[in-house]
Amino acid sequence: MIGWQLVASVIEFNSVSKAYPVYARPSDRLKEIFTLQRKPYHRDFWALRDVSFAVEAGETFCILGENGSGKSTLLQLVAGILAPTSGSVSVTGRTAALLELGSGFNPEFSGRDNIYLNSAILGLSRKQIDQRYAAITEFAEIGDFIRQPVKTYSSGMAVRLGFSVAIHCDPQILLVDEALAVGDIAFRQRCLSKVDDLRRKGVTILFVSHSIVEVKTHGNRALWLDRGCVQEIGAVDLVVNSYVAAMAAKDKRYSQMHLEDGSEQLFPEPQPAALALEPVTTIPNMDGRHGNGRARILGIAILNSAGEECAYLESNSVVTVRISVQADDRLIRPTVGFLIRNHLGLAFSSTDTRREGLELGPLQPGQILTTDFQLSLPTLYPGHFSFSPAVADGPLHGETACDWIDNASVLHLASGTRTIYGYISVPCAVKYQLEKGVPSTAEL
């Protein structure tokens, strides 16, 4: 007799829909209650519509979609926080969830009290929590704040503690929403490494992330949601390629300078960039800043070939990184440059004026220097890339660094026409030669 081995599904969605009532005025809610809901005073907003899928034990299942597509609602249904409006949800196994900042924490309780409370809710005994308390606090790394009320925590500290509790309670199913995005790079990498460890131990993981690289690195299968409806479900590579192509097409539509019917322009034709470098004074983002203060960065801009700020990056295109700095002290050997990181926080590329063979003369206090770096982007894997500008009196690193801003500008690289495996497509020329076969005896 042939034995059949069945792989159990630990999560099953069967034609699940979820609606939220939306009231035009607060009083409409009361009117509906007083009429015992015989007369509706609301309209339904459908966060999910007819969603069906199954997740097998030990699988890492990723969920993609824009903000508002229903990803968080789906995870809350799995966690049992919400009930479906129609359809059925089946979940088998202990579920630990990190769905939002400080999820499940009492803000008035200390971090220590919340560890015991949340661990007990997840089914651990007092003795088990005592045994794991040190490991939880060590992973969270929030120091003496563990004795302070959670309401005094920063968003990053709440995520640290919430994730640490979730992974140390022996979950059979782990739900991770986009809350990790607020964590610092080092902690985020540690969390993703822990996710890999849990996956190898057979833990089922539902993973929501806007990072395409993370989805492709950690996922077995993926689900793409759009306005609450399933667009595609299947192998990660296929779903990701479809999703990125759709997002790139949408970005292009937004960036076009024409009306939908093409009859007239929303903006005038772009003018060629002037020869004079116009200083930039905007810093879009600032994740960290350090330096000796002898000079400061005034702004950074990523420009396209028309001299306009880029809404996104494209492979095989030319962009200009413009950086403006101002000296607060006399700089003998000023150096301006930048570092590019990918979405995982890994240093991807860097350059500066000295490396490019440009020796700048002394910079006097109050003088403003604007530098353009023209880059020819190769064919890269789609994702987010950040630019960190810097100015120094000598090398950019060490004591000579005057000002450094981490991730001052972050742009999405749109998907190209070619599928990229890895991080970059290396230019390659292929030659071949076909040897003539030896004739057979019959041909002689």
Image (cartoon, grey):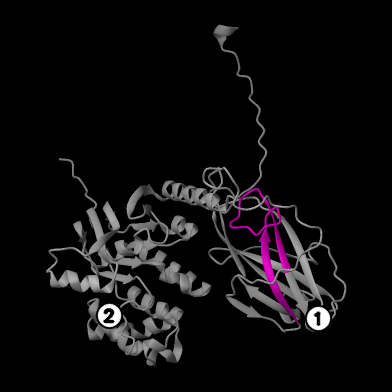
- Is 318 covered by the magenta stretch? yes
Res 159 → quadrant: bottom left
* Image: 185 above or below 231: below
Judge from the rendering whether residue 39 lies leftward or rightward of residue 21; answer left or right.
left
First in sequence: mark 1 vs mark 2? 2
Report the Cα–Cα distance between label 1 and label 2.
Answer: 57 Å
Q: Quadrant of the N terminus?
A: top left
Find the magenta span and give its range. Answer: 295-323
Please tell me which residue lies in front, 301 or 107. 301
- Residue at 23 percent across and 70 percent down: it is 28
**Could you tell me the amino acid type at mark 2?**
Ser
Around disc 1, counting alpha carbons within 10 Å, would you say few (fewer than 14), some (14 to 19), or many (20 or more)?
few
Q: Residue 44: in sight, yes or no? A: yes
At label 2, counting other C-alpha atoms closer than 10 Å, the crowd grade (few under 14, some 14-19, many 20 or more) is: many
- Residue at image coords 53%, 45%: 419
What is the residue that sits farthest to the right in this orientation? 361
| 347 within the magenta span | no
Where does the C terminus fall, quadrant-wise?
top right
Which residue has dot 2 on it? 119
Residue 271, image x and y in percent? 73, 52
Residue 435 placement, left or right of 399: left
Residue 53 in sight in this render? no
Question: Measured from the top left, where is residue 198 in percent x and y?
Answer: 36, 66
Q: Which residue is mark 1?
A: 366
